[in-house]
Amino acid sequence: MLDQSSKITVAGAGSWGTALAMVLADNGRQVRLWGHNPVQIKEINEQHTNQKYLPDIKLPSGIQGFSSLEEALDGVDTLILAVPTKAIREVAGKINEFQRVPLTIVHVSKGIEPDTLLRISEMIEEEITSEALGSVVVLSGPSHAEEVSLRHPTTVTVSSKNIEAAEHVQDLFINHNFRVYTNPDIIGVEIGGALKNIIALAAGITDGLGYGDNAKAALITRGLAEIARLGTKMGASPLTFSGLTGIGDLIVTCTSVHSRNWRAGNLLGKGHSLQEVLDNMGMVVEGVRTTKAAYQLAEKYNVKMPITEALYEVLFNGADPKESVDKLMARGKTHEMEDLANVLEDRIDK
């Protein structure tokens, strides 16, 4: 039995952090929700709303807002880290300054750090000393915050090097609206969650260009092949990419108007510049930063990732989106099962 009186902190009062805080509160947890904007925290505490990120949603009374991270973590043993990838090191560094009791850290962001090419769990392990860090768990899967906040049926996966920590997080979150599976393949779970944002950007571009469902279906399918190709080279299980954090997350992110990566790509396809798109979104578009990291990983591991390469040229070298899609269609002929054969060959070699 879980101790329902124990406290849990969610760091990051955006849409996803707030929605996950709601799940925990629905499960009878006392939830501390930390954010850096005092006005937003005041709204959470006094109005029980977070209108900027989840309009018209009433928050459970079990959620208490904090603007001090140190106060929010006082007496807490589990932290849900729900900040953008680019803020992971900054927040982890702050935690490291005052935390003296080991924390189970559950990160729910989806990205890879450019240049270092580290996954988020690896970034956390670099920034937080062993004195302050217990286990790192990743929670990922096909899940829009807007639908979770409405308590629509949602399924996700948790993964960790420590299976007991993963099962603890599974127990914290699981309920009749929010089903949680465990998966021991933390590399595959993180890679699938991060790289699907790249394909979602590309899917948005094809929709913005008006290319329709045939093009999107092809993009999703071939995008999954790219993700699995790189992921297995990095040590992931190919089976993970057929699950929730692979094809599941890819489908929902490439086909929904809730997806900020799809929306950003859609604007690019309609002729807007990257800067115009980012200014228009008002929220972090993880796929942009991850495209750079994935492009670098493809070079490091000598993996063919034509969709990623084409998107990299659009985002960072000013390539025309339509011309880039046309070049993808004009690539030399190959066998569809060649990717599967290569993956199996790599696994046998290992």
Image (cartoon, helix red, strand yellow):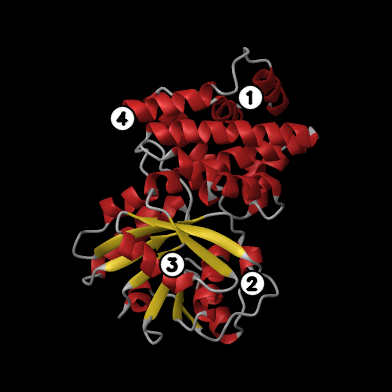
Q: Which residue is mark 1?
A: 319
Give the distance between the C-alpha atoms of the residues marked 2 and 3, in whole angstroms: 17 Å
**Badge 4: how crowded within 10 Å, few (<14), some, or many (20+)?**
few
The amino acid at mark 2 is Arg
- Label 4 vs 3, first from the N-terminus: 3
Please tell me in which quadrant of the rendered image residue 46 appears. Answer: bottom right
Q: Please, is residue 267 above or below residue 72 in the view? A: above
Callout 1 secondary element: loop
| Discs 4/2, front | 4
- Label 2 vs 3, first from the N-terminus: 2
**Badge 3: how crowded within 10 Å, few (<14), some, or many (20+)?**
many
Callout 2 secondary element: loop
- Label 4 vs 1, first from the N-terminus: 1
- Label 4 vs 2, first from the N-terminus: 2
Q: Is residue 333 left or right of residue 42?
A: right
- Label 1 vs 3, first from the N-terminus: 3
Callout 4 secondary element: loop
Residue at the (56%, 36%) spot, across then down: 224
Label drawn at residue 170: 3
Q: Foreground: 341 or 229?
A: 341
Label drawn at residue 60: none
- Label 1 vs 2, first from the N-terminus: 2
Q: Which residue is mark 2?
A: 151
| Discs 1/3, front | 3
Q: Which residue is mark 4?
A: 350
Please provide percent x and percent y for residue 210.
81, 35
Tag count in the figure?
4
